[in-house]
C-alpha cells in the first residue's frame, strides 16, 4: 500500500520531470518504484510513445502551415504536451526552448520553430555537443541571431556572442576578443534561399555552408590558436569547466529549485554549490551527455528535498491542469484556443521576449498573470463533467468515514491530498475548512446528494487551486 | 497638459493588421490614386467625405469626419520608420517597443505607466481591454490590469453563484494576507494577490456605478470602448487605456471588410466621446489610433498588400485638430517597393503624446529624440 510520503514524493517527481500525474497514475508509479520510474522517464522504452504528430495533421491539416501566425505552432505543441507519454522528453524540449530561446516575432515562419522544438524533442536528452552543433546549424536560430549576415569580410557577432554568453559559458568566462574570434569561426554557416512561397505551401529554409563566406584563417579562442571552424569552437568550449557548471546550473534552475535570474549568475553563486559540482562532474565524465545528469539529479537527495521550491511556469499551470482534469485526448479543435492560455500568463510558446528567454520563478507572477492562473485552474477543476475531476470526486467519496458522510475537515484534507498532494500551512487549512463549514457536513447517499456533493468538491478544488501554495510545484 | 485639475488620460486604439491609409484618408484630387486603385477599391470623388481641398475620408467614416469638422481630430501623415520589414508581428513589435533594429523587451506604454506611478500605488493605472497583454504594456515589475470583458472580470469568475463566490474571495483575501511574513517569494505572491483583488474590486465597483444614455453597438470595439468609458468615468485613477480592433489585414475582399471595420470603429468612437461628454469627462482624454503599417498603393485585384507609411489619428477636445505633416508622394517613381515612404518617425508621434500630453520625459521611453509633430 502506497504511503503518503511515497505518493507525495512521486507527485513531486512527476510535476518536475513532467506535468503532474493523477492519483491513479501515482499509485501505479509508486508500485513500480521511484528509481524505476526515474529510469523510464530518462530513458523511455521504445513502446512508450510521444504524441502522434501524423494523426494531428491528418485531423487538423491547417496546423502544418508555417507563417507569421504563431497559433498553429502553439496548438501543435500543446497537443504534444497534453498527449505525450514521454513527459520528461517533452519537458526537456521545453527546457531547451527556454535556453536556446528563439522567437517567432522575428523568425516570422512558425513552421521553423516547430521544427526546432522537434529537434529538441529528438536530441535534447542526448549529447550536448551534438545539440550545440545542431543548434548552430538550425535555420530558425541562424536567422534569429543573424548568422546569415556573418561574412568573412563583414562578420556579425550576434550568434557568436550569444553562444558564449547564453548557451554555454555565461558572462565572465570569455573576453570580447573571444566573441569576435568565435564569430569568425562561424562565418559561412548560413541558410539556403527558400523556394518562393507558392499559394499552397511554405518551403523551408535549410542549412547551407558557404565556403566563400567562411573565414578559414587562424583564430585565437580561449587561449588556443588554430584555423578553427564552428565545431572546433564548440569542442574548445566543452573543455572549459565553466561550461558544464553553466549548463548544469540551468538544469538545476529548471528542474530542482528557482535560482536568481540568469543575468545575475556572474554575481550570485548557486543556491547549492555542491549539487552543481556533483552534476558537473557527471556531465563531464559522461562526455557531456544529458541523460546521466538527469538520472543523478532526480535520484538525488537535494532534488527529493526541493518540494515546492519552484514557482509553476504558465506551461505547468495550463498543461498540468489539462492533464489532471482529462478530456483532451488526441487531435481536438479546442486545443487551438487553449494554446493561447500560457501566453495570457506570460509565456507565449515559440515567442520568448528575447534570446535571453523568459524571466522565471517569482517573475511569472504579476497581478495580471495571477488572475489568469487562478481563473484557469478554478474553471477546470470545478467542472464536475470532466473525467479527471470525476475521478477525484469518486476518491473523495470512497474515503467517507461514516459510509456516505464526511466532516468539513475531512473534505478539505481529502481534496488537498487528491489535487496534488499539496502541503498547506495551518492557517490556509483553517480558511479552507471555514469555507467547507459554511455548508455543513457533506453526505451523498442519494443521487441528488451526490450531485450536490460533487459540486462542493469542485468548488473546494477551485479554492485550493487559488491558494498561494498551489502556485508552487 | 490639460487645463483642468484632472490628470491627462490616454486611450490607445490599435488597428491591428495594417490599416489602408490610402482609403481612409483619400487624396481624392490625385490622379495617381485613380490610376492605382481600381474597381471596388477606388472611392469615387463624389462619395469621398471631403475634409479639405485635397483629402477626404472613406464614406463609411462619417462619424470620424464629424469629429474632424469640429476641430477635435488631428491626422498625422506619413508615419512609420525606415526599412520596414512589412511583417505584422515584427512591425507591431517595433511599434510596441520602439526598437526597430533589435528585439525590444520593454513596451513604451509600460514605461509610461511606470513613470506615471513609479511606486505602483494604483494597480489600475494602466488597463488593457482585451485578452493577455500587448507587448507595448509589458515592463517587468509594472502591474497592468488586463480585462477581457469588464462585466465578467475578476478572480474566480467561473464560480457562478454570487454568494459562494463572495465567501471564496474573502477566504482568498485572508489566505493571501497571511502570506505576509512567510518568506520573500510567498510574501510577493501574497501582496500580488491582494493587489489583483483590489484592482478587480476597483474596476467592478466602477461598473456598478455606471449609467449612461448612450447605447453602444454590440460589436467588439463598441464593447471595448464602452468598458473604457465605464472605467474612466468611475474615476479610479486609470491614466492609460489600451485596446485593439481588427483585422485590417485586407489582402483580399478588402471592400466589404474595410467598410465593416471602419463602420464599427467610427460609430464606437462617436458613441464613446458622446458618453464621455455626458459625464463631463472628455476634456482630460486624448485617443490615439495607429496601425503597424499602411498598405500598398496599387491594389492586387481584390485587396491590398502590406505597405509602409500610415496615418495616425489623435482625437479629443485638447487636440490641435487638422492635418499634421505631409501626405507622402504617390507617384510610382517616388514609392519604395511600391509603398508610400514614411516621413514622420512613429517615435516622434509617441514623444508628442508623452511630453505634451502626459508630461513625461519621452527620450528614455522611446529610446531617442525624434521630430515631434505639434498636435497637442
Image: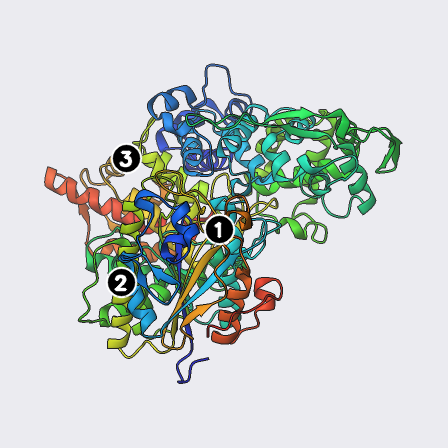
Label disc, if present, on residue B206 of the rendered structure: none
Q: Is residue A3 left or right of residue A399?
A: right
Callout 1: 10 Å neighbours few (<14), some, many (20+)?
many
Q: Please name whichever residue, A220 or A465, is drawn nearer the observer in this view of the structure.
A: A220
Camera-nearest label, 3 or 1:
1
Q: Which residue is mark 2?
A: B62
Q: Quadrant of residue B184?
A: bottom right
Element type at mark 1: helix
| SS under mark 2 | helix
CA separation in Å, label 2 and label 3: 63 Å
Camera-nearest residue between A56 and A44: A56
Q: Are marks 2 and 1 in contact (CB under 8 Å)?
A: no
Q: CA distance from mark 3 to mark 1?
A: 50 Å
Visible in this render: residue B204?
no
Crowd class of label 2 (few under 14; some 14 to 19; many from 20; radius 10 Å): some
Which residue position is annotated with label 1?
B92
The subunit carrying tag 3 is A
Q: Residue B281 at what x, y percent from top left?
A: 31, 77
Q: Which residue is mark 3?
A: A395
The CA distance from mark 2 to mark 1 is 28 Å
Identify the residue at the far bottom of this view: B4
Residue sitting at x 79%, y 43%: A174
Amino acid at each position: 500500500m502506497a504511503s503518503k510520503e511515497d505518493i507525495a514524493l512521486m507527485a513531486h517527481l512527476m510535476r518536475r520531470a513532467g506535468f503532474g500525474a493523477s492519483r491513479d497514475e501515482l499509485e501505479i508509479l509508486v508500485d513500480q518504484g521511484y528509481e524505476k520510474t526515474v529510469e523510464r522517464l530518462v530513458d523511455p522504452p521504445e513502446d512508450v510513445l510521444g504524441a502522434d504528430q501524423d494523426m494531428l495533421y491528418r485531423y487538423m491539416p491547417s496546423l502544418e502551415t508555417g507563417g507569421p501566425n504563431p497559433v498553429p505552432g502553439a496548438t501543435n505543441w500543446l497537443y504534444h504536451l497534453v498527449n505525450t507519454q514521454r513527459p520528461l522528453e517533452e519537458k526537456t524540449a521545453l527546457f531547451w526552448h527556454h535556453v536556446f530561446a528563439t522567437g517567432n516575432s522575428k523568425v516570422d515562419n512558425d513552421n521553423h520553430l516547430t521544427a526546432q522544438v522537434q529537434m529538441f524533442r529528438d536530441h535534447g536528452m542526448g549529447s550536448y555537443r551534438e545539440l550545440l552543433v545542431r543548434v548552430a546549424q538550425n535555420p530558425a536560430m541562424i536567422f534569429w541571431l543573424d548568422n546569415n549576415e556573418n561574412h568573412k569580410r563583414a562578420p556579425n557577432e550576434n550568434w557568436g556572442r550569444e553562444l558564449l554568453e547564453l548557451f554555454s559559458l555565461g558572462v565572465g568566462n570569455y573576453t570580447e576578443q573571444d566573441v569576435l574570434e568565435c564569430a569568425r569561426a562561424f562565418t559561412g554557416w548560413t541558410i539556403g534561399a527558400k523556394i518562393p512561397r507558392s499559394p499552397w505551401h511554405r518551403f523551408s529554409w535549410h542549412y547551407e555552408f558557404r565556403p566563400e563566406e567562411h573565414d578559414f584563417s587562424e583564430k585565437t579562442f580561449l587561449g588556443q590558436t588554430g584555423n578553427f571552424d564552428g565545431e572546433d569552437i564548440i569542442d574548445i568550449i566543452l573543455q572549459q569547466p565553466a561550461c558544464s557548471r553553466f549548463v548544469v546550473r540551468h538544469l538545476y534552475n529548471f528542474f530542482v529549485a528557482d535560482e536568481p535570474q540568469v543575468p545575475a549568475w556572474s554575481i550570485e553563486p548557486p543556491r547549492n554549490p555542491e549539487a552543481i559540482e556533483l552534476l558537473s562532474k557527471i556531465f563531464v565524465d559522461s562526455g557531456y551527455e544529458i541523460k546521466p545528469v538527469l538520472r543523478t539529479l532526480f535520484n538525488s537527495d537535494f532534488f527529493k528535498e526541493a518540494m515546492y521550491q519552484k514557482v509553476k511556469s504558465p506551461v505547468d499551470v495550463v498543461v498540468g491542469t489539462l492533464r489532471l482534469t482529462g478530456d483532451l485526448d488526441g487531435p481536438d479543435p479546442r486545443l487551438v484556443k487553449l494554446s493561447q492560455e500560457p501566453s495570457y500568463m506570460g509565456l507565449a510558446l515559440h515567442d520568448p521576449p528575447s534570446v535571453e528567454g523568459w524571466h522565471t520563478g517569482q517573475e511569472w507572477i504579476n497581478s495580471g498573470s495571477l488572475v489568469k492562473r487562478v481563473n484557469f485552474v478554478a474553471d477546470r477543476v470545478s467542472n464536475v463533467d470532466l473525467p479527471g475531476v470525476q475521478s477525484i470526486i469518486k476518491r473523495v467519496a470512497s474515503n467517507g468515514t461514516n459510509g456516505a458522510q464526511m466532516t468539513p475537515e475531512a473534505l478539505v484534507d481529502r481534496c488537498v491530498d487528491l489535487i496534488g498532494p499539496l502541503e498547506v500551512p495551518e492557517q490556509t487549512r483553517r480558511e479552507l475548512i471555514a469555507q467547507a463549514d459554511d455548508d455543513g457536513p457533506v453526505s451523498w447517499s442519494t443521487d441528488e446528494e451526490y450531485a450536490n456533493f460533487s459540486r462542493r468538491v469542485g468548488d473546494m478544488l477551485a479554492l485550493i487551486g487559488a491558494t498561494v501554495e498551489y502556485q508552487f510545484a | 497638459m490639460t487645463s483642468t485639475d484632472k490628470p491627462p488620460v490616454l486611450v490607445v486604439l490599435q488597428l491591428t493588421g495594417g490599416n489602408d491609409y490610402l482609403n481612409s484618408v483619400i487624396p481624392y484630387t490625385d490622379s495617381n490614386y485613380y490610376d492605382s486603385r481600381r474597381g471596388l477599391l477606388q472611392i469615387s470623388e463624389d462619395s469621398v467625405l471631403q475634409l479639405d481641398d485635397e483629402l477626404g475620408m472613406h464614406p463609411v467614416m462619417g462619424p470620424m469626419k464629424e469629429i474632424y469638422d469640429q476641430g477635435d481630430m488631428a491626422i498625422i501623415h506619413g508615419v512609420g520608420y525606415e526599412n520596414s520589414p512589412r511583417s505584422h508581428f515584427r512591425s507591431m513589435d517595433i511599434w510596441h517597443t520602439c526598437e526597430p533594429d533589435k528585439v525590444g523587451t520593454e513596451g513604451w506604454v509600460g514605461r509610461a505607466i511606470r513613470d506615471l506611478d513609479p511606486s505602483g500605488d494604483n494597480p489600475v493605472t494602466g488597463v488593457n481591454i482585451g485578452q493577455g497583454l500587448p507587448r507595448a504594456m509589458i515592463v517587468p515589475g509594472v502591474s497592468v490590469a488586463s480585462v477581457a470583458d469588464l462585466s465578467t472580470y475578476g478572480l474566480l469568475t467561473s464560480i457562478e453563484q454570487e454568494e459562494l463566490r463572495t465567501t471564496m474571495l474573502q477566504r482568498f483575501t485572508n489566505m493571501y494576507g497571511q502570506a505576509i511574513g512567510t518568506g520573500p517569494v510567498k510574501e510577493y505572491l501574497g501582496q500580488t494577490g491582494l493587489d489583483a483583488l483590489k484592482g478587480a474590486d476597483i474596476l467592478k465597483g466602477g461598473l456598478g456605478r455606471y449609467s449612461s444614455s448612450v447605447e453602444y453597438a454590440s460589436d467588439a470595439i463598441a464593447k471595448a470602448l464602452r468598458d473604457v468609458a465605464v472605467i474612466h468615468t468611475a474615476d479610479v485613477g486609470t491614466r492609460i487605456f489600451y485596446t485593439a480592433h481588427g483585422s485590417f489585414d485586407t489582402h483580399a475582399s478588402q471592400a466589404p471588410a474595410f467598410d465593416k471595420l471602419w463602420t464599427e470603429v467610427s460609430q464606437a468612437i462617436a458613441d464613446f466621446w458622446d458618453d464621455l461628454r455626458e459625464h463631463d469627462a472628455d476634456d482630460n482624454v486624448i485617443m490615439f489610433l495607429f496601425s503597424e503599417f499602411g498598405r500598398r498603393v496599387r491594389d492586387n485585384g481584390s485587396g491590398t498588400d502590406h505597405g509602409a507609411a500610415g496615418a495616425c489619428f489623435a482625437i479629443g477636445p485638447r487636440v490641435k485638430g487638422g492635418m499634421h505633416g505631409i501626405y507622402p508622394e504617390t507617384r510610382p517613381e517616388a514609392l519604395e517597393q511600391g509603398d508610400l515612404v514614411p516621413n514622420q518617425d512613429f517615435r516622434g508621434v509617441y514623444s508628442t503624446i508623452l511630453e505634451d500630453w502626459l508630461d513625461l520625459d519621452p527620450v528614455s521611453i522611446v529610446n531617442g529624440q525624434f521630430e515631434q509633430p505639434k498636435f497637442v
